[in-house]
């Protein structure tokens, strides 16, 4: 039986000056790299496939398979781009990871670049995460100085340059093709697919885009092997996962546990609901994943479990709200976010979020009618699956799930005599 | 692409040799020059405290882009400011979770405090003469990826965690008085422009910033609980071999 | 492996797939977009961002359809403008799928929530895809009760394009056109999300030669024309297909008019020529024809007052015929036709010269020209057409390499430029033998082969030695050399081009700047050729023409005539007694002074003109003729492709040149059989062609004169938008002309002591111009000037040309704005 918490990525965070190369090397840092450079790149890809590692950025695409899509021997440069544009509401795992243990990411980058035959990698970090950018920049410099980056890494003949690239405030750049356009110095608007980044990504060359937590896992898989990785988690969603608990819990924070852990288990570790006020609703993986309620405490939080229960695992950003919070108000706030962050490229998302916000604001202000609920749902239906990228789908998640579980609260807003809930003032 | 034969009417003299050298250095970091645009706009903000028309023309000139192409990018991202900013930029998270925990109240309190003539300060407006000591630009921000520490705010992108309206007011009042209270997580506070220089990727002479705190109790909570309970991930075997090289299909 | 074919009888050719759309089985080429396949079936899926000549965007989401692949329905409706066909695909559009229909209605509703619905005052109303599709696919009422997004309107983004952001649906056709097709990314998406809008950079208007296309492809009324604004409703306009009269591209156009007045011109769709684009000159420059000073009645010079006075056609033709006949029977008459005639009109002049005036002294070249040029045109250009292997627009697109010689494509033949850019965006290597990295060099991703003006022949001759990659590229099958009108100013250049073509196997095309030049060459409006490519010097050819024209054998003059310069020298010196002058402006000629003297000293001048010019100022008889829009005819474009057009404005009473000449000839007892353009064309057809074989010129380039201290070699060519008289009366268009500046290299600026902030004065012994200067990558010792822009009229002020030596100095004072009347150059 595996322990309730399985610190792998978060283990070094407790060490003093964990962000320095000195600490990192004392704690097995860069041993995986030495090992990997002695292997054939395709062995590393195969090992990653065998491990069952799935992308930690939200979509859960099998990482080894993604690497395997990169055409080899095509004569083009290959690129690795790290999606460190953490911005999904509720998500707060990558930035602490990069601040506390930047070298684990860098080591993962070097191994992955070696595997996919990339000689240039970029870490696209959210601009607002300045301290994280500092730590990454410092770590990259240390890695260069130690011979882990640059020409002929550790005498292997493999060259790699890494650049830390600060974003500038756009949630949409977390979408991988928007991120690539942004990294190319353009407006961060999603690209048409196909072609997919694996064939035409950065500068129209084959590119792997992976999340921070995904790539930071790679050195551990190289050192521990795929079987070890699979000792944690579930068959189709193996490995440890950082669960970020926030909101009305007694001890919010980052909890690294095997995939498939439930909120009930996590809440127990976090000391339960704050002040004993009962749970009302929560997001399993950020605001773009449909809401859960107290009925979902035992849903195994892995890709399959969350999906089977009608939501998505997303980024395992568990935002927990107690009974004092109005669902329509929370939904309105999230919708304001999506309206602000819609890139504007496609009609449904751009115009739809503009409309939804106004309806919700009007309802929360007490000027709604029951037919507004129908309009909300129909506009959501005209956005969901009609937008250019997944931002539109995410934008309607809080609304449709909010109405699904808490329709009475929306109806109550239409009745001017209804009790006013906290937040909905 | 150059817009031919348009004699430049914008004065670029504010961008001195050092800035030009830095711009060139940015270009050299990337396989294709245009990738340097986002950092270069941060660089421009480190000089002027916002992206001015001169800043747009400067980037266009450095990267052989049209001013329209640069404007298209500069207006897309919220961190590029169109008006001169104060000495400090205060960003209050008002996304749902922080808002429910008090973020909206913090923002309202600061608006009121920084406003004048009974009018609260508006989004991205500045209290005081922009750029002068104690001047503050206030904005509400989207999720700042510190939800376990909410409500949070940032000053010049350094984190001030677990805020309340009163704590935030105290912080801002101190900033106005020329003090620089230490962030919960991040480097010792400087000002908006110096932060922008680092965002552009220039850290020279600021190496000690790396030692600014980063791990709040919340950050290491799981790791701590595990350590206290003796919980670990399963141990790794000593002789892990790679799978064989797969055959080419 | 052979599979038993399914029931279907449809055969699927190689490279094709079979799919089903709305129950119809259809075969489509691989890679075709669903929206196009559906359209071929007659199923129109509504769309906004989709445009067949732009890269797919998938932005508006209006064209969503349901798609089934391998028997499994895709979970979401798909944008048919971005999805390509696949074998076995089953597609359901709004016609058969409630899901697609609902999706489309949903998108339409969302597009309209922020739309101002101001159709009654919108120029686009009545021809608006948004309006049409909203009526067809939209809801009858709106559920939107909130606040609409508003913007100040309209916003001028240039002097000729107005932007209404409230009407915009952000389809990005305009920005994609500007970035992809024109290469002018001066209009962009700004802001984000619901605040996203089209715009330009502050202080940087949308200065593109192709900006008008964005108005035409805008699927709503967001981009409108300043010149056309509030002028008409589409349903009140009559549309007539037409051909552009400006450059030699021969673009298909549509002229929209009402009550006898042209309201606007639009690009026609001709995939072989201009695809769906035209330049802004072709679109916006048409009001010259309705200028207040246009001649409506014939004029004769009053013997007593010496002034022109209006008169009857009868008197004018009598006076002209008498004067010309007398001159013909004395020392002779020269005919200068200019480069803007239709094939039919040019033919009438060519025939008039031979039959009525009994002379070969006829030349269309109202610009710098040379005997070498005529040799080159005769040997290399004459008779080439798309049908006999001549270079075409599509050949340029397919060429592995293109070398532009003394040719500035964006300025001189903008649609050739667009095709070059299109080719270069795919794989074509483009080289430019010129003087600096002009916008066209940049936008065709071209390689500049820079040389001193006059040094072009030497540069070409040394290509193999110094730039073997260029000759290597030109040896690729299908490679092309494009040579422009400026080559006539460089002795030895046409010879060098012919030599390079022979040695590499590259095909050559000559791209003149004016619409009528190629046609005039073919119909014999030149001193050495009779119509149909026949040499004057060839007795058999002469007798063919004499037979066809019903002339007595031996009537046609046997020796080649004088060229333009020869005619002017002869007239000025009394060796010719009269001139017949069509659309010629002396200030386009290398020596305007000579032209002035010729017009003054010629005993008798007949001018066939639209509006007053330096020629009509000296004319004894002025015969008004019809502008292109008031007549029918054809242009022969640079490809040798005939571009027929009918009369747009009927019944104005204006007569085409061929009709005037026909009547004039009758007065002189000669029959031209050119009473109408159709009759002239028929007469020309009867004559047929018999293209002469001739050898290419072998003129060697003279040694270049080196500039001395304070001197530079002048590089100059004309810009698309300049002082040309066909752009008169178009202030909105003029506002997008490029700034008037001189260019020198950085070293030359230092050498000449030029302060780049200050103005410079460029002078010859004949005159001077003062203007701002900027640095460009010109060879040292060279100064570039626009040929005929604003106060800088190189011919008129400096009496200089490409390759002339000029003095360059820092200006003493500020550049004096020349008066508006001080402009030269017809077109």
Image (cartoon, rainbow, N blue to C red):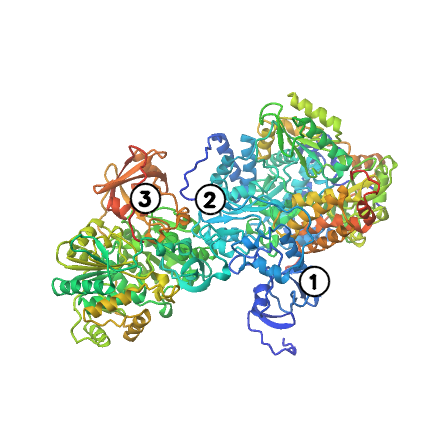
Residue position marked by numbered label 3 in the rendering: C820
Q: Tell me: residue C712, above or below residue A397.
A: above
Q: Within 10 Å of the Cα at label 3, are there few (<14), some (14-19), or many (20+) other Cα atoms?
A: few
**Spatial CA span between label 1 and label 3:** 63 Å
Q: Secondary structure at mark 3?
A: loop
Residue position marked by numbered label 2 in the rendering: C205
Cβ atoms at labels 1 and 3 below 8 Å apart: no
What's the chain of the residue with tag 3? C
Q: Tell me: residue B236, above or below residue C278.
A: above
Residue position marked by numbered label 1 in the rendering: C99
What's the chain of the residue with tag 2? C
The residue under the point 60% across, 23% down is B133
Marks 2, 1 in one chain:
yes
Q: Earlier in the sequence, mark 1 or mark 3?
A: 1
What's the chain of the residue with tag 1? C
Q: Quadrant of residue C190?
A: top right
Side of C780 where C220 appears, left or right: right
**Spatial CA span between label 2 and label 1:** 43 Å
Q: Earlier in the sequence, mark 3 or mark 2?
A: 2
Tell me the quarter of the image containing the C terminus of chain C: bottom left
Foreground label between 3 and 2: 3
Side of C223 where C580 appears, left or right: left
Q: Residue furthest left?
A: C330
Q: Secondary structure at mark 1?
A: helix
Side of C131 where C786 appears, left or right: left
Question: Residue A91 placed where, x, y %?
Answer: 73, 41
The residue under the point 49% across, 35% down is B54
Q: Secondary structure at mark 2?
A: loop
**Spatial CA span between label 3 and label 2:** 24 Å
Asked whether residue A54 appears in the rendered view, the answer is no
């Amino acid at each position: 039986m595996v322990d309730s918490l399985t610190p792998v990525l978060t283990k070094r965070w407790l060490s003093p000056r964990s962000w320095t190369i000195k600490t990192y090397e004392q704690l097995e840092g860069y041993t995986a790299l030495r090992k990997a450079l002695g292997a054939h790149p395709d062995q590393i890809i195969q090992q990653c496939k065998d491990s069952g590692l799935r992308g930690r950025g939200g979509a859960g695409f099998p990482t080894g398979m993604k690497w395997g899509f990169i055409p080899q021997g095509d004569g083009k440069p290959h690129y690795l781009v790290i999606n460190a544009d953490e911005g999904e509401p509720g998500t707060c795992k990558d930035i602490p990871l990069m601040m506390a243990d930047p070298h684990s990411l860098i080591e993962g980058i070097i191994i992955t670049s070696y595997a996919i035959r990339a000689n240039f990698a970029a870490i696209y970090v959210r601009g607002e995460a300045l301290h994280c950018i500092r730590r990454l920049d410092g770590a990259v410099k240390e890695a260069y100085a130690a011979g882990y980056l640059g020409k002929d890494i550790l005498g292997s003949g493999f060259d790699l340059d890494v650049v830390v690239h600060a974003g500038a405030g756009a949630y949409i750049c977390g979408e991988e093709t928007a991120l690539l356009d942004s990294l190319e110095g353009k407006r961060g608007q999603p690209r048409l697919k196909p072609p997919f980044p694996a064939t035409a990504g950065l500068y129209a060359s084959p590119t792997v885009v992976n999340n921070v937590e995904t790539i930071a896992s790679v050195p551990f898989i190289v050192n521990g092997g795929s079987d070890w990785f699979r000792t944690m988690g579930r068959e189709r969603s193996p490995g440890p996962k950082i669960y970020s608990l926030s909101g009305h819990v007694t001890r919010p924070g980052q909890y690294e546990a095997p995939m498939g852990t439930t909120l009930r288990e996590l809440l127990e570790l976090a000391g339960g609901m704050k002040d004993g006020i009962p749970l009302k609703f929560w997001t399993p993986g950020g605001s773009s994943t449909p809401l859960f309620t107290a009925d979902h405490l035992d849903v195994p939080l892995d890709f399959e479990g969350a999906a089977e229960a009608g939501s998505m695992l997303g980024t395992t950003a568990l935002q927990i709200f107690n009974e004092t919070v109005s669902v329509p108000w929370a939904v309105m706030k999230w919708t304001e976010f999506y309206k602000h962050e819609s890139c504007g490229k496609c009609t449904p998302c751009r115009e739809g979020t503009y409309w939804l916000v106004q309806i919700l604001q009007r309802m929360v202000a007490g000027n709604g009618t029951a037919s507004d609920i129908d309009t909300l749902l129909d506009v959501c239906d005209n956005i969901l699956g009609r937008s250019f990228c997944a931002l539109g789908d995410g934008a309607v998640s809080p609304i449709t799930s909010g109405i699904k579980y808490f329709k009475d609260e929306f109806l109550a807003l239409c009745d001017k005599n209804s009790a006013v809930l906290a937040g909905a003032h | 692409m150059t817009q031919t034969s348009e004699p430049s009417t914008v004065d670029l003299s504010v961008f001195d040799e050092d800035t030009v050298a830095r711009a060139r250095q940015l270009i050299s970091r990337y396989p294709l020059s245009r990738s340097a645009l986002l950092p270069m706009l941060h660089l421009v903000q480190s000089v002027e405290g916002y992206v001015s028309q001169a800043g747009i023309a400067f980037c266009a000139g450095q990267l052989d882009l049209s001013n329209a192409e640069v404007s298209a990018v500069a207006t897309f991202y919220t961190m590029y400011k169109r008006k001169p900013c104060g000495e400090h930029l205060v960003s209050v998270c008002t996304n749902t979770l922080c808002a429910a925990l008090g973020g909206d109240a913090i923002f309202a309190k600061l608006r009121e405090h920084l406003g004048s003539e009974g009018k609260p300060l508006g989004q991205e407006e500045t209290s005081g003469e922009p750029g002068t000591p104690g001047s503050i630009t206030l904005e509400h921000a989207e999720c700042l990826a510190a939800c376990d520490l909410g409500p949070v705010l940032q000053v010049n992108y350094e984190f001030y965690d677990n805020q309340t309206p009163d704590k935030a007011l105290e912080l801002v009042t101190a900033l106005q008085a020329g003090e620089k209270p230490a962030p919960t997580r991040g480097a010792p506070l400087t000002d908006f422009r110096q932060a922008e220089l680092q965002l552009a990727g220039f850290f020279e002479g600021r190496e000690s910033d790396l030692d600014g705190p980063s791990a709040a109790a919340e950050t290491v909570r799981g790791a701590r609980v595990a350590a206290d309970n003796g919980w670990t991930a399963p141990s790794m075997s000593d002789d892990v071999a790679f799978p064989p090289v797969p055959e080419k299909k | 492996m052979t599979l038993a074919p399914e029931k279907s009888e449809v055969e699927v050719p190689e490279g094709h797939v079979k799919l089903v759309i709305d129950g119809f089985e259809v075969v489509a080429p691989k890679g075709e977009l669903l929206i196009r396949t559906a359209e071929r079936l007659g199923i129109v899926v509504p769309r906004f961002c989709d445009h067949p000549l732009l890269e797919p965007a998938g932005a508006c989401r209006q064209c969503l359809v349901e798609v089934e692949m391998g028997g499994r329905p895709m979970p979401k409706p798909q944008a048919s403008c971005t999805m390509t066909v696949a074998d076995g695909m089953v597609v359901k559009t709004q016609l058969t799928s409630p899901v697609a229909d609902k999706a489309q209605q949903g998108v339409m509703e969302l597009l309209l929530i922020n739309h101002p619905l101001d159709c009654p005052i919108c120029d686009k109303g009545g021809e608006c895809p948004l309006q049409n599709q909203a009526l067809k696919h939209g809801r009858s009422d709106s559920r939107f009760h909130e606040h609409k997004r508003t913007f100040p309107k309209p916003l001028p983004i240039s002097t000729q394009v107005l932007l209404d952001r409230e009407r915009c649906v952000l389809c990005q056709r305009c920005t994609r056109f500007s970035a992809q097709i024109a290469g002018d990314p001066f209009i962009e998406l700004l802001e984000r999300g619901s605040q996203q809008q089209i715009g330009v950079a502050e202080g940087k208007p949308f200065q593109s030669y192709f900006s008008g296309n964005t108005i035409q492809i805008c699927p709503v009324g967001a981009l409108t024309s300043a010149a056309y604004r509030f002028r008409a409703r589409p349903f009140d306009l009559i549309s007539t297909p037409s051909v552009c009269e400006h450059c030699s591209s021969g673009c298909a156009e549509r002229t929209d008019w009402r009550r006898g007045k042209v309201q606007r011109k639009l690009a026609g769709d001709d995939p072989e020529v201009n695809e769906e684009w035209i330049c802004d000159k072709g679109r916006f420059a048409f009001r010259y024809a309705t200028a207040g000073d246009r001649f409506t009645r014939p004029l004769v010079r009053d013997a007593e007052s010496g002034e022109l006075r209006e008169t009857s056609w009868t008197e004018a033709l009598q006076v002209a015929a008498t004067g010309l006949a007398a001159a013909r029977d004395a020392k002779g008459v020269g005919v200068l036709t200019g480069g803007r005639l239709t094939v039919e009109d040019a033919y009438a002049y060519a025939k008039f010269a031979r039959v009525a005036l009994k002379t070969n002294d006829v030349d269309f070249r109202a610009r710098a020209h040379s005997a070498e040029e005529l040799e080159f045109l005769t040997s290399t250009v004459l008779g080439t057409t798309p049908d006999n292997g001549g270079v075409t627009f599509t050949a340029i697109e397919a060429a592995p390499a293109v070398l532009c010689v003394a040719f500035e494509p964006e300025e001189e033949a903008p649609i050739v430029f667009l095709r070059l850019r299109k080719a270069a965006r795919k794989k074509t290597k483009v080289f430019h033998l010129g003087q600096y990295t002009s916008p066209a060099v940049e936008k065709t991703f071209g390689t500049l082969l820079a040389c001193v003006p006059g040094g072009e022949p030497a540069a070409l001759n040394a290509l193999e030695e110094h730039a073997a990659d260029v000759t290597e590229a030109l040896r690729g099958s299908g490679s092309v050399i494009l040579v422009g009108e400026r080559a006539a100013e460089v002795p030895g250049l046409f010879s060098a081009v012919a030599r390079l073509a022979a040695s590499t196997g590259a095909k050559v095309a000559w791209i003149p700047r004016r619409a009528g030049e190629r046609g005039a060459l073919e119909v014999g409006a030149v001193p050495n050729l009779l119509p149909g490519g026949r040499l004057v010097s060839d007795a058999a050819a002469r007798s063919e023409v004499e037979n066809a024209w019903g002339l007595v054998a031996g009537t046609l003059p046997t020796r080649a005539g004088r060229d333009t310069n020869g005619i002017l020298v002869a007239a000025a010196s009394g060796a010719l007694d009269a001139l017949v002058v069509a659309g010629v402006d002396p200030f386009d000629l290398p020596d305007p002074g000579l032209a002035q003297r010729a017009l003054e000293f010629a005993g008798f001048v007949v001018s066939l003109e639209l509006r007053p010019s330096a020629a009509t100022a000296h004319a004894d008889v002025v015969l008004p003729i019809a502008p292109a829009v008031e007549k029918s005819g054809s242009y022969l474009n640079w490809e040798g492709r005939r571009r027929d057009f009918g009369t747009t404005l009927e019944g104005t009473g204006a007569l085409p040149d061929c009709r005037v000449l026909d009547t004039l000839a009758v007065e002189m007892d000669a029959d031209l059989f050119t009473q109408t353009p159709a009759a002239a064309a028929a007469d020309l057809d009867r004559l047929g062609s018999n293209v002469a074989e001739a050898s290419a010129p072998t003129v060697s380039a003279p040694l270049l004169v080196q500039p001395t201290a304070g001197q530079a070699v002048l590089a100059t060519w004309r810009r698309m938008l300049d002082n040309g008289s066909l752009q008169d009366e178009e202030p909105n268009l003029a506002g997008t002309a490029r700034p008037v500046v001189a260019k020198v290299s950085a070293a030359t600026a230092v050498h000449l002591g030029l302060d780049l902030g200050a103005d410079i004065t460029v002078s010859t012994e004949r005159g001077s111009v003062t203007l701002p200067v900027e640095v460009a990558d010109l060879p040292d010792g060279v100064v570039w000037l626009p040929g005929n822009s604003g106060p800088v009229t190189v011919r008129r002020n400096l009496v200089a040309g490409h390759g002339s030596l000029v003095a360059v100095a820092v200006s003493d004072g500020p550049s004096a704005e020349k008066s508006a009347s001080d402009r030269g150059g017809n077109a």
